[in-house]
Image (tube, grey):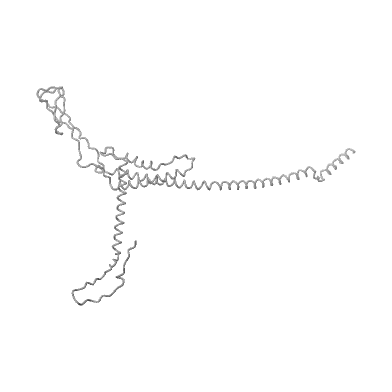
Amino acid sequence: MKRRKNRLLTRKKSKSKTSKPKKDTPASVKTETSKKPKSASKSKDSSKKSENGKKSENGKKEKSSSTPKAKSEAMIKADEAKKEAVNLKRKADRLHKKCVDEIAKMTEENLPRKPKKGGVAKCNVTVPAGKSAGDTITMSNPHIPGQRLKVSIPKNKIAGDKFPVKVPLPTVQKSGKVENKFTKECIDALDKYSSIYDEYCQAEAKYRSLAPKKKNLEPYKVGVERLKKYDKMITTFPKNLEIPIEPTFLRLLVRRRRQNQNKRVKKEGLEAASIASVATPVKKKKPNVLKLLVPQASDKFPTVTYNEADFKLTVPAN
């Protein structure tokens, strides 16, 4: 019986312990309180970092905004000069191609070629008496009067036999003055190409002067590069011309065309001025007329009015 009572008492004690609510221990309180400041400190740190980040970004922007402005102006000018040079180079290339096409259209009348050799013709020669195979004889060329040729008699030929011989034909020679005559279209194309190429040289020199030093571009010598404008074009002319084409001749053609054009413009201006002067005639001033009364052989004379101004002495100024 005692054992049963002891068992019941232990069970009741255990139930009472489990049913009572547990109080918060100081350790748990400490942990909760310690956790709260950590989160707050984290938020404060993050806010400080964000503020510092914003300040640093603003500082960087201010620094970057101060320096690129000066650089951007120089770079913009260099880019504009480069674009202008590239566009002019493309135009010059197109006009160069047009000049080459006009050169190809010109015939032998415009660009006379070297006289062609006459070639060779065959003729028969008879072996004279007293001559045999291996001997050399002289003969006259029937196509070129006065020309004498030496011929050796072939084997198995005797006096009276005939054998073929090749003789040269005369060269074709042109009569009259020989000169290169360019067409008007070709000269106009050369003039346009020359002016555009000169503008390209100026633009390229400007770009190289404005380009940054990092690119290490050599200075562009305008005077030297202008002389090279016809170097490629000369190679397109026929090689068998009687008078070869040189760059100086092409420059002369362009110079003459511009001189003639300026003369034409001046002449038109003078004609327009003369037409304008005819349209608005200038009024002529009437000359001052002095009447002189000559006395006649008679006893009656007309009365003359006295004018004091006519008798005033005029002293010359020293």
- Left or right of residue 35: residue 9: right
Position of residue 33 in the picture relative to residue 259 (left or right): right
Please state, as top left, top right, bottom left or bottom right, where the C terminus lies in the image: bottom left
Q: Position of residue 155 (x, y in %)?
A: 15, 22
Residue 157 % position (x, y): 13, 23
Q: Toward which corner of the image does residue 96 lie, by quadrant?
A: top left
- Image label count: 0
Quick one: which residue is furthest to the right in this view? 2
**Between 278 and 203, the one nearer to me in the picture:** 278
Q: Position of residue 165 (x, y in %)?
A: 16, 29
**Which image quadrant for residue 148?**
top left
For the N terminus, give its image quadrant: top right
Residue 135 placement (x, y as % from top left): 14, 22
Relative to 279, residue 230 above or below? above
**Side of 234 where 158 appears, left or right:** left
- Nearer-the-camera pick, 148 or 217: 217
